[in-house]
Image: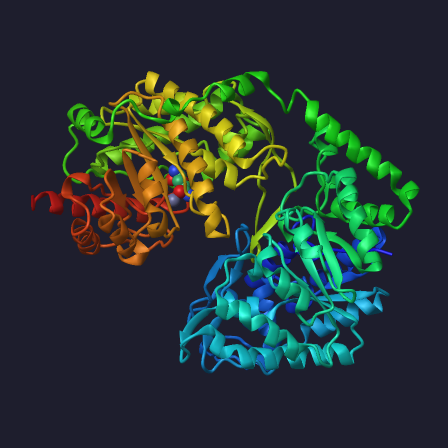
Amino acid sequence: MALAHVLGFPRIGAHRELKFAQESFWKGASDEAALRATGATLRARHWQAQADAGLDFVTVGDFAWYDQVLGTLALLGAIPSRFGFDPKQLTLADYFTLARGSKQHFAMEMTKWFDTNYHYLVPEWAADVQFDGGVDWLHDEIAEARALGHKVKVALVGPLTLLYQGKVKSGIANKLDLLPKVVAGYQKLLQRLQAAGIEAVQIDEPILALELDAGWRDAFAPTYAKLKDNAPALLLTTYFGEVSEHAELLRTLPVAGVHLDLVRGAGQLEQIAAGWPQDKVLSLGVVDGRNLWRTDLDQVLTGLKPLQAQLGDRLWVASSCSLLHVPVDLANEPKLDDELKSWLAFATQKLAEIVAIKQALNGKAAEVEAQFVASRAAQASRRSSTRIHNPLVQKRLAAVTAADAERSAGFDARIAKQQAKWQLPAFPTTTIGSFPQTTEIRQARAAYKRGEIGHLDYLDKMREEIRVVVEKQEQLGLDVLVHGEPERNDMVEYFGEQLWGYTFTANGWVQSYGSRCVKPPIIYGDVYRPEAMTVGWSQFAQTLTSKPMKGMLTGPVTMLQWSFVRDDQPRETTALQIALALRDEVCDLEKANIGMIQIDEPAFREGLPLKSRDWPHYLDWAVRAFKISAAGVGDETQIHTHMCYSEFNDILPWIAAMDADVITIETSRSDMELLDGFGEFAYPNDIGPGVYDIHSPRVPQVDEMERLLRKARGVIPDTRLWVNPDCGLKTRGWPETYEALENMVLAAKRLRATV
Ligand code: GLN
Ligand code: ZN
């Protein structure tokens, strides 16, 4: 009999209960007992959902008070010594200090978990780090689940993934130097779980989906050989990509079973299953843990049937990865219509899908027939629905040519015309788009959304805000102005709401980090722009000034990257559809006499695939999408783009290939070092390296910015250099923003005096 399980369930709660409990505890509004009670309630609810659905185990260990990597460090006792905490006596308050910092200690660094939008806390590896055991929280949770009558599978971040995802701080040359200590820590932990009667442990090693060098790959066999004694049965899980290059390793590794992500790597099954040992479980991740479409159950079943003959009860059916990356329950979406809902499955619905597949494999197809019928209907309606398939978009897509991606002249010719037209001073100053989003702005937007104020009232309020923002920029003496984006709640949502093919959930929250959750839009159909989205605002703003007013759009890759994306066509096709919609907006802006247009792509680098061999394909279509959105304008129209939080050096040829007339990037936090690559590469177009960090309320002084600009001049020719902050200013207050920009303009003026 096949078994069913999930690799993890969202911990935050359908109504973000964990978030509110965390934040209340942090504010001191409630005590630790209250927070712990909320955690226990959520765990109990999530285990019950798994049991009720008919999974063979509930997963324990996927819960975390902030992050699962930090939780693993707390469990092993491997917390950074610089905080001065005793790992065995760590309190919840201490744990949050590791995550969030305090007056005395800066927080542990946070970064993206593989290619997801989830952020984990980066382990700090130093010679003095201990793995002698820490908090008992996991053991308490196991006891909790058992007291509730559940059959338990424990989930752990694996030793090699934990080690790999950390950063070397001091006293060791190489992360792998710590391996013996790490292994000893896991041995102790697994022995304790064994002694407690735990039968199965899921041990997550997603680094197997990366391009591992030989040192890391060769560490697997000896590590797992040491872990197997006096330990529960280990199910080694891989996910986020295919691992077929490790087929031999996986067959021979001394573990009880292996999990594969068949959503991200369907092609790997044949190779890995061939000659799969008689004594090993193969857990197959067939239900997508990264996206929210209803599974095609027939297709999955057909794919698994031949394996069932081979594997028998060693075949397990699972989610592709943890369900952490999808929202909790579709039942909480009253505003989505029934047709749309019939296409979707959130975490709770995915549990039922996994069980339906298991039942069908186990000869109980009749019991789950209704599920299969609904799945079939959903696939059929997605294939034919006119809400999804728009002939206008299809026709246009089919007609796109290579020339559509090219401006009519090269950069040198364009920039000469643009300079002649605008007559900007040397080192022109500008900002990235948004200005402080004050309470009044947020309230006005919310009131309009709720229907409490009418359209004209709303228009008035926003125009008033734009007027103020333009006036301030004029006073500051900035050279290229922006309207300030007061009408935007979010840079993706704002456009998604105006485009066909996008929809939004009421409660589709996904944890991003700690208590922070995001509600990504869903792209379900062909993307089509029924009417102009930003022209009115930009046009109005331009009437208020004789300086150039930059139009402001979100680029196709970012629109894609920060949404749940269709799985019935390649990502690049969806990107191209968005690009065409944006192209029309860009051309409309130009027609309305907006002569500079910025197309933001902060998520451009984030979209890079996990394996570098897949980079060129991604970069090709991503660059093309950007260029198609931009290239409909004449030579005199200046296209800007903006990117942040990124390393660019390894993809510079593609950034140059985007051929934006001006690019602004985040550089101040790296002391302009990020810019060196652009210099070495001789990046050909104009560039504005950010001269101050907008994430901090601190007002930068003129000298500091002047110093950074002088550094930039060492790398970028004077004629190519712009002056601007690192990113948009929407999270800042006005007083510090005004002062900072005043200083920035002064720094630019000092520079001008030297040429
Ligand atoms: N134009 C956007 C803003 O200024 C850019 C935001 C971003 O890069 N994340 O807010
Ligand atoms: Zn930015």
Residue shown at the point (66%, 82%) measured from the top left: 188
**Image quadrant for the N terminus?**
bottom right
What percent of the width, then of the height, locates residue 528?
53, 22
What percent of the width, then of the height, locates residue 711?
18, 54
Q: Is residue 423 above or below residue 606?
A: above
Q: Is residue 354 above or below residue 596?
A: below
Residue that protrudes farthest toward the front in the picture: 275
What percent of the width, then of the height, locates residue 596?
29, 28
419 vs 566, left or right, is left
The residue closer to the viewer here, 388 or 553, is 388
Q: Is residue 8 visible?
A: no
**Image quadrant for the C terminus?**
top left
What percent of the width, then of the height, locates residue 695?
38, 52
* Quadrant of residue 250 within the rendered picture: bottom right
Q: How many marks?
A: 0
Residue shown at the point (69%, 28%) measured from the top left: 382
637 vs 246, left or right, is left
198 vs 640, left or right, is right
> Which quadrant of the picture is home to ligand 1?
top left
Q: Is residue 473 visible?
A: yes
Q: Is residue 123 above or below residue 367?
A: below
The residue closer to the viewer here, 279 or 426, is 279
